[in-house]
Image (cartoon, grey):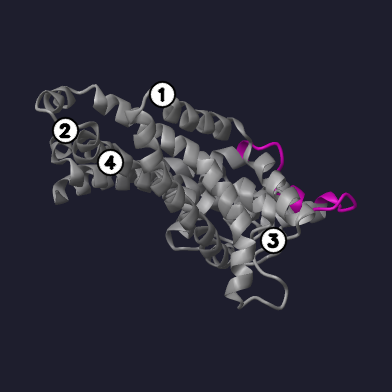
Amino acid sequence: MAKYIAKRILKAVPLLLLITVICFVLMKLAPYDAVDALTRPDMSQAEIDRIRESYGLNDPVAVQYLRWLNNLLHGNFGYSLLSHTSIKYDLLIRIPNTILLMLPSYLTAYLLSIPLGLLAGSRRGKWPDKLIDGFCSIGIATPTFWFAMLLIYAFGYRMKLLPILGMHTVGMEKSIPDLLRHFLLPYLVLIFSFLPDLTRFVRSSAIGQWKEDYVLVQKAFGAGRSEILFRHVARNVLIPLITKLGMALPLLVTGAVITETVFSWPGIGSYFVKAVQAMDYPIVMSVLVLSGSLVILGNLLSDILYSIVDPRIRST
């Protein structure tokens, strides 16, 4: 087991390095220079050149990349071009806010998808399956921001039951009930966003299991549908579903970009969008590297979890 994990980690290292290269190159190929966010139209060329020199932008590209990579490896993400605040400090403040929103939302959708997907898969073609699959189709086709605006209009403007912006009411930052009231609408939006895909995944796995030979054998021995479902099908469906837990890791940081922006939730998503709009490249690069790294770590976690529940994977 330890040998398998070590081998997977060694394979992840060059991928992490490749992510840093891609992020750096993409920023260099962007139509705007980082200095554009710092200059004014009335600045002279000499002033602009001094700014470029102070940020090391006149150095060779390879030198700039190695300097940036060295800073990353030492936990130095740099500073915002506009606010001049530490990006590391901003991330440490905002990441917990995003996790606070994402973790309960994803876990709720994950747990709801299991009974819904099993029910749909075991009743394929019948009304429970059509009802659940119809909901999934609507959920997948509905834009997240549109559903968010619908909830804002209904519960925020019409009924005035819930706040629609931010994480706290001013002056009530330590109030748990106030936090829960701000939390509820984005929480519902994210559940609606995650649930259809997870349910379809469980449904597809369940349908595949019902076609397996062991189901026919159990039927031949007189086992009922419920017994087969809960003692055999459900257990085998949960094995591939475990991989979804690993892939949820990047979602904990950058999985709510649209929702956070719509509700002005002070997390990584809204922070990233504002940085893109302001051409604050150090922030954009840091978030992209963080997100890409979490995708690789999520895949690694999925592989490890899968190897635990299915030892045959370790020998491949």
x, y percent for residue 177: 60, 72
Tell me, yes or no, whether the two marked residues, 1 and 2, touch with CB atoms within 8 Å: no
x, y percent for residue 197: 46, 35
Pick the residue in front: 199 or 77: 199
**30 part of magenta stretch:** yes
Tell me which secondary structure the magenta stretch mostly adopts: loop
* Quadrant position of the C terminus in the picture: top left
Q: Residue at x 82, y 49 (%)?
A: 45
Residue type at mark 2 is: Thr
Left or right? Give the position of 273 relative to 136: right
According to the image, label 1 marks what residue? Answer: 126
**Label for residue 234?**
none
Tell me, yes or no, whether the two marked residues, 2 and 3, touch with CB atoms within 8 Å: no
Discs 2/3, front: 3
Q: Residue at x 39, y 44 (%)?
A: 247
Residue type at mark 1 is: Lys
Tell me, yes or no, whether the two marked residues, 4 and 3, touch with CB atoms within 8 Å: no
**Label for residue 238?**
4
According to the image, label 2 marks what residue? Answer: 316
